[in-house]
């Protein structure tokens, strides 16, 4: 099955005139990712490999949809009978209020990254937390339970990761965000999960910490895992959100960002002697979980993994 006539990236203008935009496209586009930026997304190559592997005659495409365009884009995806969507930066939080129904988990997290469209109804799901947990196991051969974790960010991905850490009963969770109010709000929401007495040393099990090198350094001795859930690293010239001098060899570092080549954080972590991985395996596992929601059958994980190599 060979793809015909698809563009690298579609826009809202294409969706408004979808029949014209896709007249040469075969098989039809019925799945997509909406984001801004989105050009870096490897979801199309991974999901198209999965569709080919299981002989489903449809394609997955990338859409550059700006924040003010999300409502109309979702409406049009419904009209054109799309079957499923992924939402990436910056749409995951706004999308919650634009669904017809929202599964219990994304309602609690306040973030939707996967949408199923069945009978014209938009149903919101979140597979980021599950994808994150499986990526930690896949990259570092360890479970989250009992780990001491620092998450950079308090947006859609960070919220899913933080709630997953809480549900997996990690030992300690530190949230660091550029806007400290959002970090504090997330910590307040997670508080009921961290009331137990288990703790190594005199540090709090759950806290929001300022986005500040000295404050992060102060945490190092009481952390096992650092996760970047901000977009810092997407652009080749982005600095590492944490410099190598503020990292240490005992740490595991997961950058949810991925791009061609190592991200600045992965380079900084390796320089500090820490174990580090980028976001490809999280992409794989959250994408496999979304595939299973759309098609109600096991995702062809091997084919999807090969497509990301
Ligand atoms: P959101 O827009 O919901 O949240 C963005 C977060 O990043 C906010 O906490 C924001 O802070 C912070 N941020 C944005 N710009 C900067 C900056 N210049 N410096 C410091 N902090 C910044 O986006 P998502 O949560 O959906 O996505 C975040 C990133 O996570 C994406 O770039 C994506 O690459 C990655 N991701 C990867 C996945 C994977 O499968 N590998 C899955 C999901 C996400 P503030 O609140 O202060 O604005």
Image: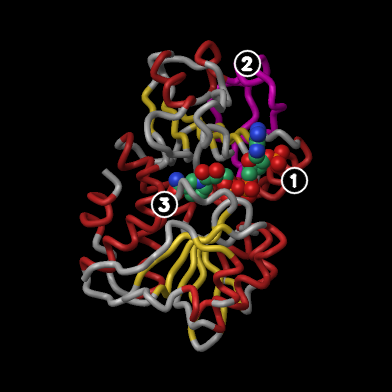
Which residue does the image show at 37% across and 75% down from the upper left? 24
**Eyeballing the image, is 149 above or below 308?**
above
Is 71 in the magenta?
Answer: no
Nearest to the observer: residue 26 or residue 295: 26
**Eyeballing the image, is 217 above or below 87?**
above
Instruction: Decide which of tag 3 and tag 1 comes sooner along the chain.
Output: 3
In the picture, measured across the screen, residue 174 lies left or right of residue 38, that is right
Task: Tell me which segment is drawn in magenta.
Answer: 194-219
Q: Is residue 41 visible?
A: yes
Residue under pointer 3:
131
In the picture, measured across the screen, residue 198 lies left or right of residue 298, that is right
Q: Is mark 2 within 8 Å of ligand 1?
A: no
- Determine the secondary structure under disc 3: helix
Residue under pointer 1:
185
- Determine the secondary structure under disc 2: helix
Ligand 1 quadrant assignment: top right
Disc assigned to residue 218: 2
Q: Position of residue 101 (x, y in %)?
A: 61, 77
**Eyeballing the image, is 195 above or below 44?**
above
């Amino acid at each position: 099955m060979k793809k015909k006539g698809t563009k690298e990236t579609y826009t809202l203008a294409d969706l408004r005139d979808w029949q014209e935009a896709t007249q040469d496209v075969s098989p039809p586009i019925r799945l997509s990712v909406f984001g801004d930026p989105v050009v870096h997304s490897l979801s199309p190559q991974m999901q198209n490999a999965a569709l080919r592997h299981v002989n489903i005659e449809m394609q997955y495409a990338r859409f550059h949809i700006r924040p003010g365009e999300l409502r109309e884009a979702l409406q049009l995806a419904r009209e054109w009978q799309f079957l499923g969507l992924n939402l990436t930066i910056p749409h995951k939080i706004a999308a919650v209020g634009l669904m017809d129904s929202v599964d219990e988990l994304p309602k609690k997290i306040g973030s939707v990254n996967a949408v199923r469209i069945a009978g014209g109804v938009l149903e919101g799901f979140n597979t980021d937390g599950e994808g994150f947990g499986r990526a930690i196991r896949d990259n570092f051969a360890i479970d989250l339970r009992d780990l001491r974790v620092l998450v950079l960010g308090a947006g859609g991905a960070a919220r899913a990761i933080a709630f997953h850490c809480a549900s997996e009963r990690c030992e300690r969770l530190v949230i660091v965000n550029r806007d400290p109010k959002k970090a504090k709000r997330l910590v307040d929401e997670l508080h009921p999960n961290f009331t137990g007495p288990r703790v190594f040393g005199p540090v709090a099990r759950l806290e929001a910490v300022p986005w500040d090198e000295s404050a992060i350094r102060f945490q190092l001795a009481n952390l096992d895992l650092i996760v970047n859930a901000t977009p810092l690293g997407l652009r080749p010239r982005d600095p590492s959100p944490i410099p190598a001098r503020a990292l240490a060899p005992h740490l595991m570092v997961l950058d949810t960002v991925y791009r061609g080549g190592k991200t600045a954080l992965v380079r900084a972590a390796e320089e500090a002697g820490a174990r580090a991985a980028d976001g490809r395996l999280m992409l794989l596992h959250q994408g496999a979980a979304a595939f299973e929601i759309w098609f109600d059958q096991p995702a062809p994980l091997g084919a999807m993994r090969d497509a990301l190599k």
